[in-house]
Amino acid sequence: MNRIRQYEPRDLADLYEICVRTGASGGDATGQYGSDDLLGDIFAAPYATLEPELAFVVDTGDRVAGYLVATADTAAFVERYREEWLPRFDAKYPLVQPAVTADEEMIARGHNPDSMLAPGTELFPAHLHIDLLPELQGQGFGRALVRTLLAALRERDVPGVHLGVGIRNLGARAFYARLGFRPLPADPTNETLLGIRTDAEV
C-alpha cells in the first residue's frame, strides 16, 4: 500500500534514482551526465541531508517511488549548503571554468548555491523540489505531498513557498497550476518561478 511518510536516511538511494529518472524535464536523464548521481547531489540529497524534517516520501512497501524535499528558509539554506554541503560536492565534482560541456554546466550550478536566491520571494521564503516516478503520477500523491509540506510550513509560521519549473516541462507546469501555484506577484510574467501561500487549500 502506497503511503506518505517522513524521509529516513535509508531512503537516500531511492531519492537519487527518482531524481535522475525524472531529471530530463520530467523524463529519464539516466546516462545524460558523467555520473547519474549528479542531479541528486544538487536537487535532492542536500535537502534530505540538511533539512530532513521537511523531506517526505511515497513508500510503496518495497521502495520509495516519489519524494518532496524542501527548506523553510531559502537564504538560511544557501548558507548551510555553502558551509556543509559544498565541500563534499566540490570533492566529488571539481569546478571547471569556463563550463563548456553539459556536465560542467550542471556542476557549476551545484557550485553556485546563490542561484537559489530568486528576487521577489520575500513572502515565499521556502522552496521545494518534488519528483514522482511515472508509476505514481496522476494518482494524487503529488498533491498529497504538497499538502503535507504546507501543513509543516504553517507550523513554522512560513507564509509561502516557491519553486522553479522548466519552461519545457509542460506536465509539471500543468500540475502546479492545478494545485494553485502562480507566478510570483513581483514578476507575474515569469512562468518558471511559481509560488503558493501555505494557507492555500490544495
Image (cartoon, rainbow, N blue to C red):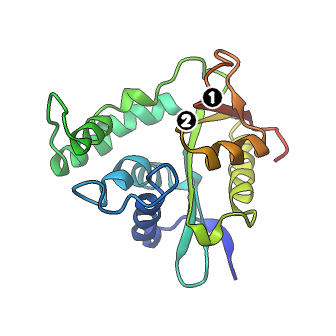
- Residue 97 rendering spot, x and y as whole percentages: 14, 29
**172 left or right, relative to 38:** right
**66 left or right, relative to 181:** left
Image mark for residue 167: 2
- In the image, residue 166 above or below residue 120: below
Residue at the extreme right of the image, as rendered: 201
- Circles 2, 1 touching at the beta carbon (< 8 Å): yes
Q: Nearer the viewer, residue 125 or 166?
A: 166
Q: In the picture, residue 199 is in which quadrant?
A: top right
Distance from disc 2 to disc 1, alpha carbons, whole Å, reads 7 Å
Image mark for residue 149: none
Dot 2: element: loop
Q: How many marks?
A: 2
How many C-alpha atoms fall within 10 Å of the one at disc 1: few (<14), some, or many (≥20)?
some
Q: Nearer the viewer, residue 169 or 79?
A: 169
Q: Earlier in the sequence, mark 2 or mark 1?
A: 2
Q: In the picture, residue 13 is in which quadrant?
A: bottom left
Q: Residue at x 52, y 54 (%)?
A: 26
For badge 2, the amino acid type reads: Ile
- Residue 159 rendering spot, x and y as whole percentages: 72, 31
Q: Residue at x 40, y 28 (%)?
A: 115
Image mark for residue 191: 1
Q: In which quadrant will I find the N terminus?
A: bottom right
**29 left or right, relative to 7:** left
